[in-house]
Amino acid sequence: MFGIIRPCGEHGCPTLREAWRAHLCGLCLTLRDGQGHGARLATNYDTLIVSVLTEAQSTASAPRRAAGPCALRGFRPAGVVDARSRGARLAAAVSLALAAGRLRDQVADGDTAPATRPARQRLAARWEAGGARLGAGVGFDTTVLTGVVERQLDLERGPVRGLLELTAPAEDAVAAAFAHTAVLAGRPGNAAALAEAGRFFGRIAHLVDAVEDLAEDRARGAYNPLDATGTGLDEARRLCDDAAHGLALAVADLELEERHLVERLLVTEVDRAVRRAFEPHGDDIAASYERPGWIRKSAAGVGTFLTCGVWRPRWSKRRGRDCEDRCYLRDGSCCDCCNCCDCCNGCN
């Protein structure tokens, strides 16, 4: 699973966690039903928003079905969005197309061992075909997504360009996927605002990915759009904040039947994603990187475990962050039992 959005089970109230899980597990199972078990690796937290947007605009809820126990749910059954849902099928198509593009990008950048490249290219071709088939079933042309990698590579190989020129392919791809949810939900009036929201979200996703990969790309001598365009972290943060503001305004313009989960994901969670990407760069200066001995490390591990991660030792990068960023129980049980993070603040 990949993407800049994290499951809101970490800091969402129970109803939001249940709604998120229904779409997440529904996407995973739709990938399985449409392309086989291996395709579940393409499950993407960000493309899940496509399923959420489709249901939020519809007058009727997406069909649900009972799913059996799963290790990722603590071996508990759950009600999930059914593969009959057009939103889930669109999300699956987008997930496969983007995962195929990611594989092709890794091969093109030389990020994989030479011996594995033919296998990755074959898998990318299968997923690309599967995404096209699922997309055709809901009237969506996935070529706008599969062409992103080639467009991106052409831009990177050409003369130095502005940073926003480099984010344009991602912006166009997400805009197309978001706008198509208006077609599926029968809300054509939302298409323009959804396309705008998609462009802002695509820009943020591209920039956050560049920031998170910056240190590794520098160590490997790999291409990074920030270094390639001479863009500093302060300017990248400004662009992300401006895009997040534009995204919030676009979401506010949408005509939705249910907007709570949409706003949580595209406003609150996007803001969290931006903070997660940029704050570690400031923490690196102040944080202690002292290497504790095994006794102190073990004792600290016990203390961290017993407090659900709320307490952190002084050498931890997470020390001093918000409670939501320290608590490591992703299913929300920490906050359910002791209310330590005030999970439902702002949810009522």
Image: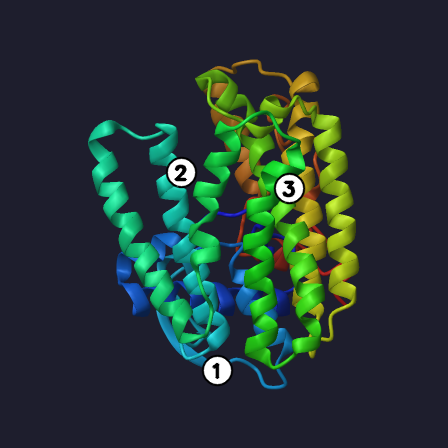
Between label 1 and label 3, give the one nearer the viewer.
1
Say few, some or many: other residues with alpha carbon within 10 Å of mark 2 (under 14 / 14 to 19 / 20 or more).
some
Image x and y of residue 148, in percent: 48, 47
Say few, some or many: other residues with alpha carbon within 10 Å of mark 1 (under 14 / 14 to 19 / 20 or more).
some
Q: In the rendered structure, which amino acid carries the disc numbered 2?
A: Asp
Q: Which residue is mark 1?
A: 63
First-in-chain label (2 vs 1): 1
Image x and y of residue 347, in percent: 74, 64
Image x and y of residue 323, in percent: 69, 43
Left or right: residue 73 compared with residue 289: left
First-in-chain label (2 vs 3): 2
The extreme bottom residue here reads 60
Secondary-structure class at tag 2: helix
First-in-chain label (1 vs 3): 1
> Disc 2 to disc 1, how far (Cα)?
35 Å
Image x and y of residue 46, in percent: 54, 54
Q: In the rendered structure, which amino acid carries the disc numbered 3?
A: Asp
Left or right: residue 93 compared with residue 191: left
Front residue of 307/198: it is 198
In the image, what residue occupies the spot 32% across and 62% down? 130
Front residue of 173/252: it is 173
In the image, what residue occupies the spot 65% across and 79% down? 187
Q: Which residue is mark 2?
A: 105
